[in-house]
Amino acid sequence: MLSRRQRGFTLVEALAALALMLAGLAGAGLALARSLQHERESGNRRAALRLAASLADELRALDREAFESLEPDAPALMAWIASVTAALPAGSTARVEDDGGTPPGYLIFIEWPVAGAGLQRLVLPVTT
């Protein structure tokens, strides 16, 4: 006949094992949530860089006078800004400025909100 101690686990041992397992699962859940947040931010950075690079290619194709004649509300720029705000989280902004340098160039600015960290900014200088 088996003694009482050899038959199985006590309630205290089972609760301790359950508490350890729950702590491990909670840690894994937090790691997964943080991983998803980093992946989302990485996707936003990739989208911003892709959009800025596509505009940079278009700006390089324009001559200086053509860009200077573009108003801030020109259809081409408005369409690009709309594509930025559609691809990035709500509250994203985009603009293009003349850098005033020699050789002439532009600065492309894209900003988007990051949860708990304020704004992330991408500045892409473009020389023509």
Image: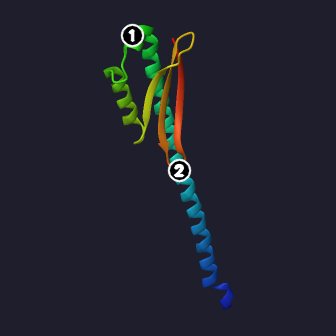
Q: Inspect this view and state whether residue 63 appears.
A: no
Q: Where is residue 87, by image quadrant?
A: top left
Q: Inspect this view and state whether residue 3 appears.
A: yes
Identify which residue is drawn at 60% across, 84% down. Answer: 11
Where residue 83 is drawn, which disc sits there?
none
Position of 58 with respect to 22 (left or right) is left
Crowd tier of the residue under label 1, counting other residues whose Cα lies within 10 Å: few below 14, some 14–19, many 20 or above: few
Vertical order, 81 against 17 (above or below): above
Q: Where is residue 90, by image quadrant?
A: top left
Foreground tag (1 vs 2)? 1
Earlier residue among tags 1 and 2:
1
Q: Position of residue 118 (x, y in %)?
A: 52, 45
Vertical order, 125 against 21 (above or below): above
Badges 1 and 2: C-beta atoms under 8 Å apart? no
User: 16 and 128: which one is in front?
Assistant: 128
Circle 2: residue type: Gly
How far is mark 1 from mark 2, CA to CA? Answer: 41 Å
Q: Secondary structure at mark 2?
A: loop
Q: Position of residue 26 (x, y in %)?
A: 56, 63
Residue at the spot of label 2:
116
User: 9 and 57: which one is in front?
Assistant: 57
Where residue 66 is drawn, which disc sits there?
1
User: 3 and 73: which one is in front?
Assistant: 73
Q: Position of residue 125 (x, y in %)?
A: 54, 21
What coloring was used for the rendering?
A: rainbow
User: 65 and 57: which one is in front?
Assistant: 65
Identify which residue is drawn at 55% across, 47% down. Answer: 117
Crowd tier of the residue under label 2, counting other residues whose Cα lies within 10 Å: few below 14, some 14–19, many 20 or above: few
Circle 1: residue type: Ala
Vertical order, 13 against 113 (above or below): below
Identify which residue is drawn at 68% across, 87% down. Answer: 5
